[in-house]
Image: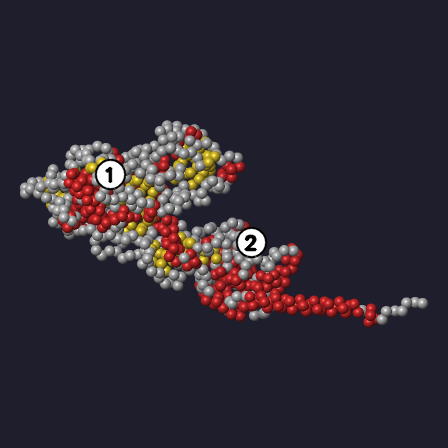
Amino acid sequence: MPPRPRPPAQRHQWWRWLALIVLLLGVNLIAGVGIWTWRLWQQLPAVSALQDWHPAEPLRIYAENGQLLQVIGPQIRYALPLQKIPLRLQEAFIAAENARFYSHNPIYYPVSYPGIVRAAWVDLVHLAPVQGASTITEQVARNFYLTRKKTITRKMAEILLAYKLAAHLSRAQILDLYLNKIYLGQGAYGVQAAARVYYGKDVDHLSLAEMATLAGLPAAPSAFNPIRDPKLARMRRNYVLRRMEKCGYITPAALGTALAEPIRTAYHAPASNMAPYATDWIRQWLEKQFGPDFTYRHGLRVYTTIHPQDQRAADRDMAVGLENYAMGLDSLDPKAWRGPIAQLRGAALRQAAAGQRPAILPPHDPANLRWGAVLEAGARRATVALEGQSTVHLSLRDVDWARSAPEGRIPTAVDQVLQRGDLIWLRPYVTAVSAGTGNPVWGTKVWHTPRHPGWQLTQIPRVQGALVSLDSHSGAILAMTGGFSYELSHFDRALYAYRQPGSGFKPFVYAAAMDGAAMQAAGNPSFLTPVSLIKDTPLTVRLADGQVYQPTNYSKRFSHTPFPVWEDLADSHNVPSVRILLHIGIPYAVSYVQRFGFPARQIPRVPSMVLGAGDFTPMQIARAYAAFSSGGFLPKPYLISRIETANGGRISLLDCPLGYTPPPRETAIPPGVAFLLTRMMERVIRGGTGVAAQILHRHDLAGKTGTSNGEDNAWFTGYNPRIVTTVWVGYDNNQGMGHWAAGAREALPIWVHYMKSALRKQPDLGFFQPPDVVRARYDPQTGTLADAGQKGREGYFLAGCLPPPTPPEFPSINAFIHALMHIF
């Protein structure tokens, strides 16, 4: 019997069950997606705050002339309102990133669904998230609130946030946010920062091709970077230009012109990175005062007193001077060549010759040095790859300073110094000796650069230095260098190196001795004048603690002939200076020198005080000498003129140690005393220890050398009626610099070169003679007033403090010891 056929209803019943299951799964899926979307929506941040958004701008520090010195912060930004961004630049970004940005079709704004479908298909084909589909609105949402991680959750959040943005902000507001927030490579955020980094100009000066280049960057800032890959950047730029023409933003003629324009980009540092010691002090003070967030993200603008031209000269001349010392070019003590930085062999040498920086080097070249790799070395010359960019040749002249030991022989062949594979430091060539004029006993050598300098072997000096240059009337810091190279050492010796100034401290004690009114008020009427005679004979002082103090002169000799005070200062004799201190008394001297801004705790109450036994910073010494330069006024040094917030508000400088302070209205010392000391220190340059400064051929210079005991500190401080500059040279560990080291040899040449630049536009007018100074005739043999009818000589004196008719009586040593007993 044949089988009975299955009823149709029963035959297709399983299809109904399948459909039901699929339906239930779909409903659950839709419900799940809906719930997930709703919960994601609830978690999204509010976007209404973006209506008043301002980008986090870095700290910017400016020079006195408005030049940008330093930008410090996590990002390079320049906030620019949309109305200040050229329309053509806006159109370039719209054409490249979201051509339907102004569309009212919900399929394309704020989210482009065709773009999502296209990107999804590409991702499916590649089985990876390779293509994005974010509109400008979505990119704003991602940049402000989301990460760049490519996940479905992040993409959904981006879409939902785009709708939120569109509901709260206009298209102009969204485009404003986009163009100021978008990352465009090289650390630049926003179109203005990118224009400055890539082209060194503002957005309103960009050409059409340059605008298209920037508009091509958001897709892949690293890949389309015109500095790293000009060829790929050109392809991307041309794509943007064609999109602009297709969208009707530019004409075919403009397209052709822009396509023909070559890629011309170079990295333009956001700042000159000049005056690093000064800007670092500002950064540290701001961070300590206001915290890092406010300091680096709120667009602070700090305006300083730094003169760029003077600062460049200070950095350059300090570096050359210290290098000269390390090479033995300006010293009577020969220096040893410490050998090459390293020996390169095989692949390492080939890579260095091709321009790859050896890992042993610091990240950046220090000061004025550049590295080189020796490719060949012979008797007459060496061939060197200069940072892999060019090839230079060194002759025997360029290496003849190098010795194997301090007392070693001068090399007679180049290959006695250099060998193939040597990694060395080079600098622009300077002449080894250029003697100054005047007394040759000091052996001062002032270098100069030939017209065609070439290159010279050198080495990083271990000795350090500092330079401070002030406007002596206002206290404005014109230039400040805290060491050989900020790259190698951030320690600011100009502000924090406390060192003995040696004979550079004498003028302050001499000023105390010249101030007759102050002397009389202290109970000692025996003031001195510039022509008072001081003995130069051996001196022994037994101190209260039983120790014996016997000062000596630098020359270790005595003249046994009394010196006038001015000559004693000019030739920097030590023993007569101690006698002057004994004459006026230590308590009075300690009190008086505080008028120059020295804290009492730093002034030692010992006979060697006049010889610079205390420890002072270059900034303190420069400020003190400003009292002589300014005619008696003691300004407060300041580095910061003003600080402005991003909205133009001012920040108070009352608590800033180097903030602006109005110039003093009252003098610290009588103008006449300042004038007399200046006249005496003019003689230091005319025929004393500072005679090498005559090479400047000016008549308005005064100054004083200083060398501490043991030759471990060398100083020179000099000034004209407007600028005072202090130079210090020494080792960080306070070791001696050599038997023949002196302020006249190590510090003075640096001062001369710096002042040559700083005084270039300063008139040579001489120092003003104040009303409290008179002229009178005196007897140079006795230092007393000339008798009627006696010829004598004419000199300057304080009114009311003329030389006495008879030589002043100096107190006996026993009387001085008795006075010391009361001090100790």
Q: Residue at x 20, y 37 (%)?
A: 541
Query: Mark 2 = which residue?
Result: 235
Q: Would you say 771 lies left or right of 350 here?
A: left
What quarter of the picture does the C terminus occupy?
top left
Q: Is residue 40 above or below residue 321?
A: below
What quarter of the picture does the N terminus occupy?
bottom right
Q: Amino acid at mark 1?
A: Thr
Residue 281 % position (x, y): 37, 51
User: Can residue 699 be seen in the rendering of this structure?
Assistant: no
Please report whichever mark, 2 or 1, sits nearer to the chain's N-terminal start. 2
| C-alpha span from label 2 to label 1 | 67 Å
Please identify the quarter of the rendering in which residue 607 is found.
top left
Q: Residue at x 62, y 60 (%)?
A: 119
Q: Is residue 349 above or below residue 169?
A: above
Q: What is the number of the mark on residue 689? A: 1
Q: Is residue 399 above or below residue 796?
A: above
Q: Residue at x 51, y 49 (%)?
A: 228
Please identify the quarter of the rendering in which residue 738 is found.
top left
Camera-side mark, 2 or 1: 1
Residue closest to the eye, 168 or 541: 541
Q: Is residue 737 above or below residue 174?
A: above
Badge 2: how crowded within 10 Å, few (<14), some, or many (20+)?
A: some
Residue 784 % position (x, y): 10, 41
Q: Amino acid at mark 2?
A: Met
Residue 601 % position (x, y): 27, 48
What is the secondary structure assignment of the residue under circle 2?
Answer: helix
What is the secondary structure assignment of the residue under circle 1?
Answer: loop
Q: Are marks 2 and 1 in contact (CB under 8 Å)?
A: no
Residue placed farthest to the left in the image? Answer: 789
Q: Would you say 636 lies left or right of 119 here?
A: left
Q: Would you say 323 lies left or right of 438 here?
A: right
